[in-house]
Amino acid sequence: MNGLLLINKDKGMTSRSVDNKIMRHFKTRRVGHLGTLDPFAEGLLIIAINEGTKVLPYLENDTKTYIATFELGIETSTLDNTSEVIKKIDVPKLTKSEIEAVLVSFLGEIEQTPPQTSAIKVDGVPLYRYAHKGIKKEVPKRKVYIHKIRLLSYEAPFLEIEVMTGKGTYIRTLGKDIALKLGTIATTIKLVRTKNGQFKVEDAQKIDDIDNLRIIPIDKALGHLISIDVDETQKEDIRNGKVIMLSRLEPLLVATYERKVLAILERSSPQLYRVKRGFNL
């Protein structure tokens, strides 16, 4: 079995625990996931198995879409509902137009300070390890990109939004920053990932249905890249890691032979492509 599995992760599970279940069931250690979901979050988790793990680096820059619910007026130590409330303040009276105006201000490139409970490393150690010891570290701001954001509902103090983000965006931090512009504080109480690139949560399955999981083959997983069929001579050259000549302009191509993916090719110079990643299918 080689490819991707679309899992609709339940709240309370770690992304790693999903990996482990897949490993045990399919008796392989070559399993990984794309974009960790915190235990309190749910929704689409893309799992790669065997040769599918080679696909993950080519999906990392895909956009991700979430539906997030924030409770305004409270803040917890982790900015989600898994820890104690450390602060409470009043929530100002807010209109729909005021909220929408604030949401629009987050479109495009923004700066975020990752939460202290994130996996970002400082001095070689993940931040969450410092947090567990009660140590607070200075975390540099990072630039992230918000492609789309819209208000779904607001019934004080609960604010629900849909947001499409680029790589590395922390929704908990986004909620905190939105609340600050609204004149209050916030904690994320529900988070659902609904899309990841071309994949949707509607097509995902629960891990409890592990005996009937549908595999997305390598060619479909790389469907966002241009695919070309090569002849037998080119196939042998690719298998042997040789540079091949192609009259193409794309920086990356998926080379196939008789409907099987051979490799991802990278343009090294005009009309010349080298093997970037080979597949054993």
Image (cartoon, helix red, strand yellow):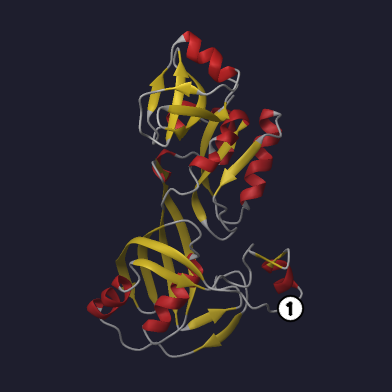
Mark 1, secondary structure of its residue: loop
21 left or right of 267 in image: right
Residue at (50, 82) in percent of width and height: 74
78 or 228: nearer the viewer: 228
In the rendered image, is residue 217 in sight?
no
In this view, the residue farthest toward the top is 232
Compared to residue 92, the image places residue 5 above or below, namely: above
Q: Quadrant of residue 47?
A: top right
Residue placed furthest toward the left: 97
**Residue 226, percent across and down?**
37, 30
Give the quadrant of the N terminus.
top right
Of the pair 114 and 178, the residue shown nearer to us: 114
Looking at the picture, which amino acid does disc 1 mark? Gly
> Residue at position x 53%, y 80% from top?
75
Residue placed at 36% from the left, 28% from the top?
248
The residue shown at (66%, 29%) is 26
Q: Position of residue 54 (x, y in %)?
A: 58, 34
Image location (x, y in percent) of residue 214: 50, 29
> Horizontal and vertical percent for residue 50?
63, 30
Residue 273 visible in the picture:
yes
The C terminus sits in image quarter: top right
* Circle 1 Cα neighbour tier, 10 Å, few/some/many (<14 / 14–19 / ≥20): few
Pointer 1: what residue?
134
